[in-house]
Amino acid sequence: MIYTKNLEKFSRLDFVDTAMQGYTQALQGKQVGSSAPMTGNREIDQELVERAQRGDKLAFGMLVEKYQRKLGRLLSRMMRDQTEIEDVVQESFIKAYRALPNFRGESAFYTWLYRIGINTAKNYLVSMGRRPKLTAEIEVEDAENFEDNHETYTADTPETELMSKQIAQNVTDTLASLPADLRTAITLREIEGLSYEEIATIMGCPIGTVRSRIFRARESIAEKLRPLLNTTTDKRW
Amino acid sequence: MNEQISALMDGELALDAHDSTRLDPIFSAMKTGGESAESWATYHLIGDVMRGNPMFKPDFQQRMMQRLEKEATVLAPHASKKAIHHDDKNHKGLKMPAKWSIAASVAAVAFVGWMALQLPSQNIANITANEIAQNVPAEYLVAHQASASGNAAFYVQPASYSESAR
């Protein structure tokens, strides 16, 4: 149950009723908190970076897992072709890995990574004799808060496109079938980017309950996704 | 373990800033590449799908890790920590003697400056000896009268002295 008396404290909450109708549409014109990682996230990133700097490549792999699609979405504003985007994202991560000794934590890892990604994309387009798709320059500050560009992401093969659609449909269907408490908790977290404390205030429950609900929601969705992802489980690190 | 991973990716796993060893079991579990690693990947995928982020080919991560394996291993354990404590070092970098030297210099400059400001604005170089003598207080002259000669002979030097001096 959502405590309505707490709703006024959070101006970003009116998405909740429309969340099931399409997440990005519900967020147009609003601040997307989840695109700006919280302080805690920055600490986790810093921990992973330090481990990578100590020679732990798998720690860097966790950062790749975390930021690959966010970076892909950013770069999709500059180029359309999925294969090109994937290549540039991969190249950006490799450049970031090589430059890790120079990363001193003065900015957030994602800010640093996005800057590398944008520069890599620009260099790629110039080398191909092309210009970035957008006339306006994409700045990192913009990248951290960018909204959906309303353009369909183009999958390069029918197989990839089908897979993406199946996964998206699966997530949406499972989310809709979840108990309201779980659905609200994970939506507040993933879409609005609220902290557990904020969610606890809104839902009128302890932080531990929020943590449990978000976990159970994720597990429920992951359970439904596993048959789809099983083909690739052995390919994961 | 998966609940901890869920909280970890939300930045909600309580961490001691000076002791990250609490993460070690989680990272160790993920390194084995089993359920924990899969959960980290799938939970992030779910969040990205909910936000409408694009999905890559299923083998993207595998290809990425293969490329990483070919890269020379980075070994720069203090790169980030230097920056994190950069400000502290700047603050604490000066030792006590240096601090005292700077403080003394500043105090000296301030004192000299204050003294200069206390001087009259009149141009001292233009004051003649006669003007200074006229401004000497009478009390000063009376107090030092005993030191002065009582007759004019004091000012007269013997001619022989003058001659020998030449």
Image (spheres, coloured by chain):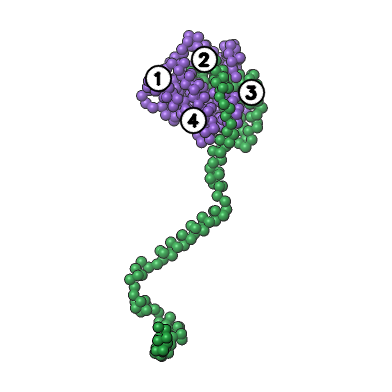
Q: Which residue is mark 4?
A: A112
Same chain, marks 1 and 4? yes
Q: Nearer the viewer, residue B92 or A23?
A: B92
Q: Check disc 1 and give the amino acid type.
A: Met
CA neighbours of label 2 inside 10 A, class few (<14), some (14 to 19), many (20+): some
Q: Chain of mark 4?
A: A
Query: Is B163 or B15 nearer to us in this picture?
Result: B163
* Chain identity for the colour green used in the image: B
Query: Which chain hosts label 1?
Result: A
Q: Nearer the viewer, mark 1 or mark 4?
A: 1
Q: Colour of chain A?
A: purple
Q: Are marks 4 and 3 in contact (CB under 8 Å)?
A: no
Residue at mark 2: B57
- At label 4, the amino acid type is Trp
- Judged from the image, the secondary structure of the residue bearing numbered disc 3 is helix
Q: For residue B19, which numbered disc appears in the image?
A: none
Outermost residue, top side: A158
Q: How many marks?
A: 4
For numbered disc 1, what is the local secondary structure?
A: loop
Quarter holding the N terminus of chain B is: top right
